[in-house]
Amino acid sequence: MSVQSASSTPPPPVPHGAAPQGPAASDDRPPRGTATASPSTRRRGRRPGRSQAARGWAYAAPTAVFVLVLFIFPVLLVGQMSASDWPLLAGNRGVNFPDNFRDAVENRFFWDSVVFTVKYTVIATVLLIGLGLGFALLVQESSRWKSFLRTSILVPSALGLASASLLFYALYSPQVGPISPLLERLGIVDEPVSFLGSPEGALWSTVFLIVWRFAGFYMLLLMVGLQGIPHEVYEAARMDGANRWQTFGRVTLPLLRPSLALCTIMCVTGSLLAFDQFYILTKGGPDNSTITVVQLIYNIAFQGQNDLGVAAALSIIVLAALVLINVAQVRGMRAPEEK
């Protein structure tokens, strides 16, 4: 009886504010439903980005190697060549800076090639951007012939520039080309026409080739920009009473500014570095009137002088000019609120 009464006696009450005693006090387990992190999980949580960073470096490594091997190293090598006496067959003979830059500027074809390259760049850029925008608007507005127009304009872009140049070289030939005999049969000319026989004829014949080849490409870029303009903007302009020209000048062109900037930069850069079409069609002739800057670099390095040092110095000059021109274009094409 005494044992039973002792065991059934309730525990004494705990004073207010005192710590509980016994098994309940030593139970540090969190309430039911509370998740606890294991030590390994806590360790991983302290360094959350290591595996992701390693995976990112692994993905970026091939591109980084590609840029390093095919861009950074060649630029550094060209910089070394530009400051050295480096004949084509003799190799590096030591530093001669700045003799190569002086010889490059004093070359008898330097300023003629610069003037011709700038002239060609202006003509090609105006025609390509203008026709590309016109074709993009035509394809955008047309509904019945949209697929046919888009395909027919884009087909020349699938042909390589060297292949297109060889094709037009045959077309322009007065001996085997079909254009000159056709003009004679129509009575437009009395004798075979040599399209590449005069400086102006060679320039405009090459420009026609470039426009035929690249107009579809720039049409595609500008068409993407046009499709990115919200239709509600045109609806609002129509409700405000704007006509087609006002909508084009005050709505389409401002919202198309990023696409126009991209096309202008690509077109100017490509025109300043023109080589294939002139090398295949004219070889710089007639009378060295169609020598571009890049073709002059090729001639100095591998034809005539065989001087890699002077050619590298001219390449550095062209690279610096391209950087300055592109920076000026980017700043000039910014929206007014971004300046």
Image (cartoon, helix red, strand yellow):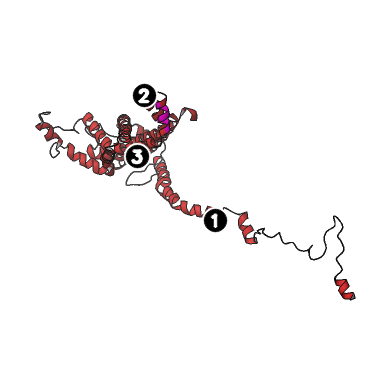
Q: Give the range drawn in magenta.
A: 232-238
Q: Distance between the residues labelled 3 and 2?
A: 54 Å
Question: Does the magenta stretch mainly form a helix, a strand or a loop?
Answer: helix
Q: What residue type is labelled 1?
A: Ser
Say whether disc 2 or disc 1 marks the residue closer to the N-terminus.
1
**Residue most extreme to the front:** 1
On screen, residue 185 versus residue 252, left or right, reads: left
**Residue 122 belongs to magenta span:** no
Q: Which residue corresponds to the image point at 88% horizontal and 72% vertical from the top-left?
A: 5
Q: Which of marks 2 and 1 is in front?
A: 2
On screen, residue 79 versus residue 30, left or right, reads: left
Q: What residue type is labelled 2?
A: Asn
Q: Distance between the residues labelled 2 and 1?
A: 58 Å
Q: Pick the residue in front: 157 or 146.
A: 146
**Residue 237 belongs to magenta span:** yes
Q: Which residue corresponds to the image point at 28% horizontal and 44% vertical from the top-left?
A: 158
Check disc 2 and report its element: helix, strand or loop. Answer: loop
Name above or below for residue 53 compared with residue 294.
below
Q: Pick the residue in front: 172 or 133.
A: 133
On screen, residue 312 versus residue 18, left or right, reads: left
The location of residue 186, given as percent across then percent down, is 10, 31
Q: Pick the residue in front: 247 or 311.
A: 247
The location of residue 55, given as percent across then percent down, is 50, 55
Residue, disc 1? 51
Residue, disc 3? 311
Neighbor class of circle 3 (other Cα within 10 Å; few <14, some 14-19, many 20+) is many
Say whether disc 3 or disc 2 marks the residue closer to the N-terminus.
2
Quadrant in which the N terminus is drawn: bottom right
Label disc, if present, on residue 243 of the rendered structure: 2
Q: Nearer the viewer, mark 3 or mark 2?
A: 2
